[in-house]
Image (cartoon, rainbow, N blue to C red):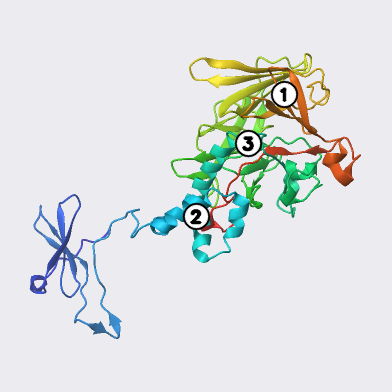
Amino acid sequence: MLPPAPEVGDDFVFNGVTPLALVDGGRRILFVSEEYQVAAYCLATGTLEELVRGIRGRGHLGGAHNHLLVPYEESLMPAGRPFEDILFSPPPARALSMALRRLPARALWCLKLVCRSWCAMIESDRFAASQNARARETAAASSPVPVVFVAPFEFLELASSPVVSLASCSGGDPGAGAGQTPPLSTSRVVCRRPCHGLLLLSHQHSNVASLCNPVTRGVEAFVFSGEVHGCAGLGYDPSREEHVLVRLSYSSSHFETHKYAMECQVWPLRNLRPRTLTSPPLIPAAVNVPPVHVGSKMYWPGEPPVLLDADGGDTMVLAELDGKLCAARTSASTETVTVWSKNDAEGWVAQHAMQLQRWPEFSPRSAELVVPVAVDPRDGRVLLDTGKALGYYDTCSRSLETVDLLGSSKLLGDHYGRADEDLFIAAVSEDSLFRPYDRNCRLW
């Protein structure tokens, strides 16, 4: 038990006493004297207790200045204007920002070398968000859908060119050079649509996730703790204006006996490490395919899937098409892919029905997994990805246009004739300057 605070002598009031603040809900008053003695006066008992001993004498004591005592209060309010407010406040800076955000991210990355003010503006989060918003508005009306090939998960961070565009492989991108070869993988990888330009690659048997920006070629690896059997997804928190990694993993799973143990880890990019949620998910989720991020929410399919003919080779995968949550059901027996979209008013509604019997490279009977990637904004055709072929399916005319096929010499270049196990990792590209890490917490 602490001893009671000593009472203040009578000479305290003769030393130029000044009131500091009301404390304890207004029950005590803090006073400070000219000799920097601090005391608390209790209104209920009328006692005056000493809190800080005074310093005899004024001015300099042994060459050191006397301390300045002021009331202290915890607050998150900045002491001055934020840096970005100062950077964008002059009218010439605002005009320059509106002009620069119309340029593609690849050109802006080179314009950082013009001067320090341009570099500070282009690297700011406010400019990156403004430029990406305009790029998404432009891409919503452009055709065809921009596609890139990503390096395999285990080599993504070490690759000198982790991303190759589809246009450069076919010779349609003069600036990138013709005849480039896409990086190939030996396993089927599903890469989700970019989240503000950032792509995430993860493996269900690894606790490492790789985040990259296909335009700036920035790559960062994130190592999660705990079990390795899981899968991570990338989302965006609009309230904090930052990207967030969310990972579900299994420590044990016995679906036959309905006994399993799951954990959920959340990793905002500004944090140095992930945090594990105290309450695990109530329903077991499938972690063999990455989740889908739609409307600031992350969606995983349930495990085991229901209403599917497992013996007939039916599979179900979630996708994001036209900004909606969709479920694609592939049937090997009928060689069809049916896409259902989530409608808040009507529930699940059949959106697309694709008959793929005439195209063996896209048929669910021969392809391991057929995933709808995107919808062309002009004609409504659905872009399908099998890991070996890319093509647009027209639901109106029931025709399919093959964009690229892994067995073609145009796509493989010098690697024509490689093993049948080779697959590419295709993803939709989005123009963006967002970094795959936070600049203020670049410590891992």
Q: Is residue 352 above or below residue 272?
A: above
Residue 403 at x, y percent in the picture: 77, 32
Residue furthest to the bottom: 62
Q: Earlier in the sequence, mark 1 or mark 3?
A: 3
Residue 116 at x, y percent in the picture: 51, 65
Q: Earlier in the sequence, mark 1 or mark 2?
A: 2
Q: Secondary structure at mark 3?
A: loop
Q: Secondary structure at mark 1?
A: strand
Tell me the number on the disc at residue 393.
1
Would you call the spot at circle 3 few (<14 residues within 10 Å), some (14-19), or many (20 or more)? Answer: many
Q: Earlier in the sequence, mark 3 or mark 2?
A: 2
Tell me the number on the disc at residue 124.
2
Quadrant placement of the C terminus = bottom right
Q: Quadrant of residue 409?
A: top right
Examine the rendering and report whether any part of residue 420 can be seen: yes
Residue 204 at x, y percent in the picture: 69, 37
> In the image, what residue type sits under mark 1?
Tyr
Quadrant placement of the N terminus = bottom left
> In the image, what residue type sits under mark 2?
Ser
Q: Nearer the viewer, mark 1 or mark 2?
A: 1
Q: CA distance from mark 1 to mark 2?
A: 40 Å
Instruction: Give the residue at x 19% y 80%.
Output: 56
Q: CA distance from mark 3 to mark 2?
A: 24 Å
Marks 1,3: beta carbons within 8 A: no
Residue assigned mark 3: 193
